[in-house]
Image (spheres, rainbow, N blue to C red):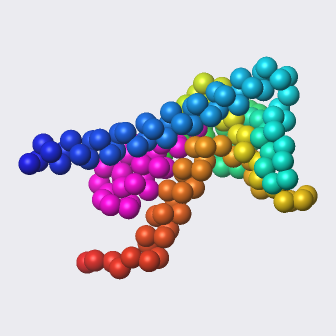
Amino acid sequence: MIFKNIKKIFHISLIFPVFIFILDRISKIYVINLSKVSFDTELFSSKYLNITLIWNEGIAFGIFSFKEKFFYNSITVIIGILIMIIILLMLKAEGLEKYSFTMILGGSLGNIFDRLTYSAVPDFINFHYKSFHWFIFNVADIFITLGVFLLIFKEFFTKKRD
């Protein structure tokens, strides 16, 4: 009985973040290779969506973008520590909260992989309306954002048990 529960927790806790990580890697590799082949960072353009490759050296939405390696490496270490905390929270969580943390973990692993591999995170999804452009983001950012929104939703709309 206990072994079945541990096995189930392990599968949910491992498979979903790995799926998100792989989906993120495939999308980034595709866009990076397309950019190399076309010798352009503007890969697709439409009325509301552009696919434009940029390299984000900061954290969320380019905040804290530093050229100096010390600050960049410090932020990377802090993100690594936060990932370990997310893993602990995910293992202790249940239900919607567990799925939220697995989404955040999967996206975080995708972005930290890029920080360690490229020293920057490739972002390419650019929604816009006329002259207003939203921040450029990637697939990992989508899952991190969904996970955070689900956690906020759970806090606001579920009853607390003592």
Q: Nearer the viewer, residue 130 or 103?
A: 130
Estimate the x, y position of residue 117 in percent, counting from the top left. 60, 24
On screen, residue 101 above or below 14: below
Residue at image position (57%, 55%) is 145
Q: State which quarter of the image contains the C terminus.
A: bottom left
108 or 128: nearer the eye?
A: 128
Horizontal side of 31 relative to 147 (left or right) equals right
Q: Residue furthest left?
A: 1
Query: Residue at coordinates 66% horizontally, 49% vertically from top-left?
Result: 60
**Residue 63 in sight from this viewpoint:** no
Q: Hey, which residue is sitting farthest front in the picture?
A: 46
User: x%, y% of residue 51?
Assistant: 77, 41
Q: Quadrant of residue 128?
A: bottom right
Residue sticking out furthest to the right: 131
For the point 38% across and 61% down, the residue is: 96
* In-front residue for pair 153/45: 45
Q: In terms of secondary structure, what is the magenta stretch mainly?
A: helix
The residue under the point 71% across, 23% down is 33
Which quadrant would residue 71 be assigned to in this image?
top right
In magenta stretch: residue 49: no
Task: Please count the marks in the image.
Answer: 0
Horizontal side of 158 relative to 25 (left or right) equals left
159 up-or-down from 91: above or below: below
Instruction: Give x and y (percent) for residue 99.
Output: 40, 54
Query: How far across and down, in percent of the image, does residue 109 sit?
Result: 50, 38
Query: Can residue 29 be seen by looking at this rendering?
Result: yes
Q: Which residues are magenta?
A: 84-111
In the shown orientation, is residue 149 left or right of residue 13? right
